[in-house]
Image (cartoon, grey):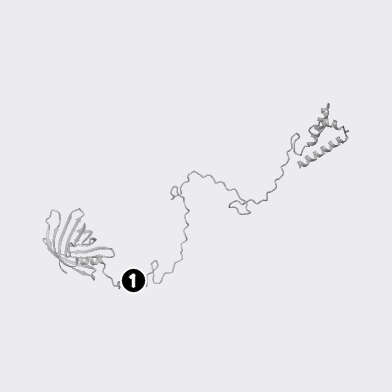
Amino acid sequence: MTRILFALALAASGAALAEEDAGTPQRPAEQQAATPADDHGHEVHEGHPEAGHEKKEEHHEAAQPAEKGVPKGETAHPAEEPKPADDKPQPAEKGVLKGETAHPAEEPKPADDKPQPAEKGVLKGETAHPAEEPKPADDKPQPAEKGVLKGETAHSPGGIAAEMAAESMKKHEVPPEVKKIVDHFTGSWSFTTTISMAEGMPPIKAREKYQCKKIANGAAVNCHGSGKVPGMGKMEATHLIGYDPELKVVRMLSWSSMGEIHDHRGAYKDDDHIEVGVETTMMGKKVTEVLDFFFPKKNQMEVKAVTTFEDGSKSTFEAKGKRTGK
């Protein structure tokens, strides 16, 4: 709009000048060429400087009409023409679907350096994970199998008893540990013994004979022995000796005429050395008894028993035997 008004003003000024030129008598060409002109093409006559100046001012005033909204004395600036729209499609930003508007990425918030108090049960520096919600229990009772009590595990028909019965009907070979110990003890034995009842007391010499027989189809041996001990009379004792496959230990159950009932347990120390022991009481006193059996040769046996009382005092029994028969 400003440009249109400015063009109309220039056109009006040009028309006024044209009318003045039409009413002014023409001078010869030489005179016209000698007459100087101002910057707008108006002649400037010598001796009349104001005339050219007045025309110049009139021309300037006519060409500068005040625009609306522009204070008098200020210069109006032409409005900027709107730029033509760029119809060329712009490439879509990465991660923005065609036709959608890309939003500026949010600036990351500054980290809160202030340490947060650790939750209960969470170590410092670790991240607390939300506790998993417990799954609802299936309260619906499950039907019990036929013949199985509530809370028990179902076994084959007939239960554990039937399983054990079927297993017992199978032919089983004697385990090598069982056979080994039975072979070591089986037979008739003659022993020479030395008994030291207490420190400072003279040792007692005696003779004993033992008969060890296989029992339970060779699963163990029953050794029964007797002898006369000076000052003590006749003494007898029976020992059941064997290997326990379930507990994997050597066991020796003993009964004696002196009131001893001991359940010794132990193991082979090597191929020809068995050690068993027991912690029990004797006449109300706590005692620990350890027996060692050595088989230096096929038909020889050496026995050493040490009984330690609760006050630390000890008694010992030593015997050397020879197998005299089966």
Give left or right: position of 42 versus 255. Answer: right
| Amino acid of disc 1 | Glu
Quick check: can you spot residue 308? yes
Q: Nearer the viewer, residue 160 or 166?
A: 166
Give left or right: position of 48 versus 211. Answer: right
Quick check: can you spot residue 241? no
The residue pinned by badge 1 equals 163
Q: Nearer the viewer, residue 321 or 318?
A: 321
Above or below for 15 versus 122:
above
Q: Position of residue 191 (x, y in %)?
A: 14, 63
Q: Position of residue 238 (x, y in %)?
A: 19, 66
* Other residues around mark 1 within 10 Å, as few (<14) / some (14–19) / many (≥20): few
Give left or right: position of 16 versus 76. Answer: right
Q: Quadrant of residue 194?
A: bottom left
Above or below for 32 versus 132:
above
Q: Position of residue 233 (x, y in %)?
A: 12, 63
Helix, strand or loop at label 1? It is: helix
At horizontal 80% and vertical 38% (from top left) the residue drawn is: 10
Q: Position of residue 56 (x, y in %)?
A: 80, 32
Q: Which quadrant holds the C terminus?
A: bottom left
At horizontal 20% and vertical 56% (from top left) the residue drawn is: 308
**View extreme (top): residue:** 47
**View extreme (front): residue:** 30
At horizontal 32% and vertical 72% (from top left) the residue drawn is: 166
Q: Which quadrant holds the N terminus?
A: top right
